[in-house]
Amino acid sequence: MDVLINVFVALHIIGIASLLGGFLTQMTAMGEGTARFNKAMLHGALTMLVTGVALVGLNQADDQIVNNIKIGVKLAVLIVVLGLVYVKRDEEKVGKGMFAAVGALTTANIFIATLWN
Ligand code: HEM
């Protein structure tokens, strides 16, 4: 079970790499007001959701303690990010404010995941 959990943690990290990496590639465009939500961001956010839910189930099945409040906060933040990226996925450019908000929420989720024990 440990190996399976670690595999899903690795997939979870690949998801955040895609979501944050997709955001970072658009930073210059964001400054010019021409950034768009790309597929790396959409698929990364979806990967976070699927692997995160799987990790909750796997950890519970393995009798590991899951911090439900921390997971709930991460989930709520991710739902906002995923909602925005999904709804605006076909827009050729997204406003600076909204784009920056998605980057800030994504970064916030990384700190929630790593600093909240
Ligand atoms: C962008 C959003 C997210 C980020 C940046 C993120 C980040 C991380 C990181 C870095 C880890 C490994 C470190 C650790 O074990 O604490 C982790 C573990 C985990 N994540 Fe996430 N996560 C996100 C969303 C989610 C969501 C939506 C869920 C559940 C619905 C979730 C559930 C879990 C679980 C169950 C673990 C392993 C158990 C734990 O140690 O807390 N994550 N996450």
Image (cartoon, helix red, strand yellow):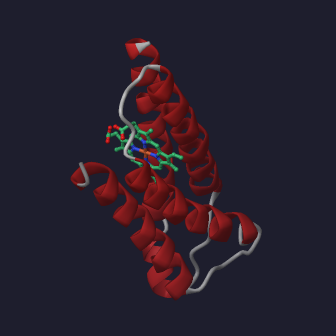
Q: Quadrant of residue 87?
A: bottom right
Residue 39 coordinates in the image, percent (x, y): 65, 53
Ligand 1 visible in quadrant: top left
Residue 96 coordinates in the image, percent (x, y): 52, 85
Q: Is residue 79 left or right of residue 70?
A: right
Residue 34 to residue 72: above or below: below
Residue 68 to residue 74: above or below: above
* Residue at screen point 51% across, 87% down: 97
Q: Quadrant of residue 21?
A: bottom left
Viewport quadrant of the N terminus: top left
Residue 24 coordinates in the image, percent (x, y): 42, 62
Residue 35 appearing in the image: yes
Residue 25 appearing in the image: no
Q: Is residue 102 left or right of residue 38?
A: left
* Residue at screen point 57% across, 39% down: 53
Residue 42 coordinates in the image, percent (x, y): 63, 55
Residue 30 to residue 52: above or below: below
Q: Is residue 2 left or right of residue 44?
A: left
Numbered label tally: 0
Front-lying residue, 91 or 113: 113
* Residue at screen point 39% across, 59% down: 109
